Amino acid sequence: MSATYFQTEAYFQARFAAAGRRLGFEAESIEAWRVWRAELHGKLRQLTGIDRLIPTAASPRTTETVQLDGYRRERVEIDTEPGVTMPFYVLVPDDLAGPVPAIIAPHGHGSGGKYAPAGRRDIPLMAETIDQHNYAYGVQAVRQGYVVFCPDARGFGERRETLYEGPEKLLMSSCRALAHMALPLGLTIAGMWAWDLSRLLDYVQTRPEVQGQKVASIGLSGGGLQTLYFAALDERVDVAVSSGYFYGVADSLLHLSDNCDCNFVPHLWEYADMGDLAALIAPRPFFVEAALQDGLNGPRGIDNVLEQLAITRRAYALLDVEDRLGLDTFPGGHVWHGTVVWDWLARWLRA
Ligand SMILES: [Zn+2]
C-alpha cells in the first residue's frame, strides 16, 4: 500500500505560473527595452540587497607569488566590506608584451573555492573534482593568454564559515549558514557574491597587465550563477559565460527545490525568470554552455534551457546583436565543456 502525501509543490507551481515574471522581457521597441532594463535592474538591486552592502577600502595585499609552467600565480587579498576579506588568485601569463584582456573565473560548488579554477591539483581532494568537472578553466584561460582572477566566494575555500573549517571539509560550502545569517537581515548570497565580484573588478582595473582591456566573467555551475548576477548587475562586465547554470526556475529550482540555498532570492520569481536576468546583459556578448544530460536542467532536460535562451534571444534580436548570444550544447553531464567557447571569447575580448 502506498502512502498518500499532501504536498505543496503544485500550489507553488500554480502561483509561479499565475504571478511570475511580472518584469519579464517583453519589449518590442528600443525605448521599451530601456524602460524595462532600468526597472528590472533596479528591482534586482533591491531584491538581492546589493545596495545595502557597505563600501570599504580594498587595501590589496599580495601574500604569495609562485612561478608555474608558462604563468605565475599570485595570491592576493582585498577587503570587500568592513571586516570582510576576499582572497583570490591572479594568474599572469609569462612574457606579456602589453596589456591583455582579463577573465574573472568564479567557481561553483564542490570546488574548494578558487582552488578548482586555478587547478590546484597538488592539494589533497582537489584532483578528483578538477577531473570530474573539467574544473580548471582559470588555467585554461591563462593558457589562452588572458590575465585570470580566481576568487573565493563567501562560504567557500578560505572563506568557509565555522562549521565547515578543516582540510577534510574543503569541498563543502557554507551557503546554508550564510543564507541563515543574511536573509533575515534582508541580504542574499547572490547579492553578496555579485558585490564581491564587483570589488574584484575594481581591483582588476588597477592592474597594469589589463588596463584599458576588456573583462569577461566565466564560470561553471555556482560560477555560472555568480557570473549571471554579476553581469546582470555590473555593466563593466564586457562578456559573460555561464556553464551548467541556465534554465527555467519552475523546473530547475522550484521543482528541484532541494538545490543549494544560494539559488534562492526572496521575491525574485515574482519578477523574472533566468532568461530575463540574462536579457539584462544585452547587448554585451553572453554565452551558455549546457550539457544535454545535466540533471540540473530539470525533468524536461535541454528544452528548459532553450526556452530561457529564447527569452534572452528576443532582447538580442531587438537590439540587432543576435550574433552576441552564443550556445554550446554537448552530450554529457554537469561539466565545464571549454571547447568552442574559447574562440567565441577571443572574438569579443580581442576585438
Ligand atoms: Zn550554494
Image (tube, rainbow, N blue to C red):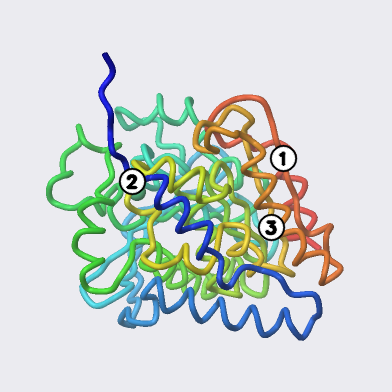
Where residue 19 sits in the image (x, y, percent)? 50, 65
Report helix, strand or loop for mark 2. Answer: loop
Where's residue 169, x and y in %? 21, 36
Q: Nearer the viewer, mark 3 or mark 2?
A: 2
Q: In which quarter of the image is residue 339?
A: top right
- The extreme left residue here reads 162
Q: Which amino acid does label 2 sit on?
A: Thr
Q: Tell me the element at label 1.
A: strand
Q: Which residue in the structure is indicated by mark 3?
A: 286
Image quarter of the C terminus:
bottom right
> What residue lies at 59% left-to-right and 27% top-to-bottom?
293
Which of discs 2 and 1 lies nearer the camera? The answer is 2
The answer to whether residue 318 is left or right of residue 335 is: right
In x, y percent, where is residue 321? 83, 65
Q: Which of marks 3 and 2 is nearer the N terminus?
A: 2
Q: Mark 3 falls on what kind of element?
A: strand
Q: Which mark is residue 328?
A: 1
Callout 3, which amino acid? Phe
Please give the residue where the numbered disc 2 appears in the rendered image. Answer: 8
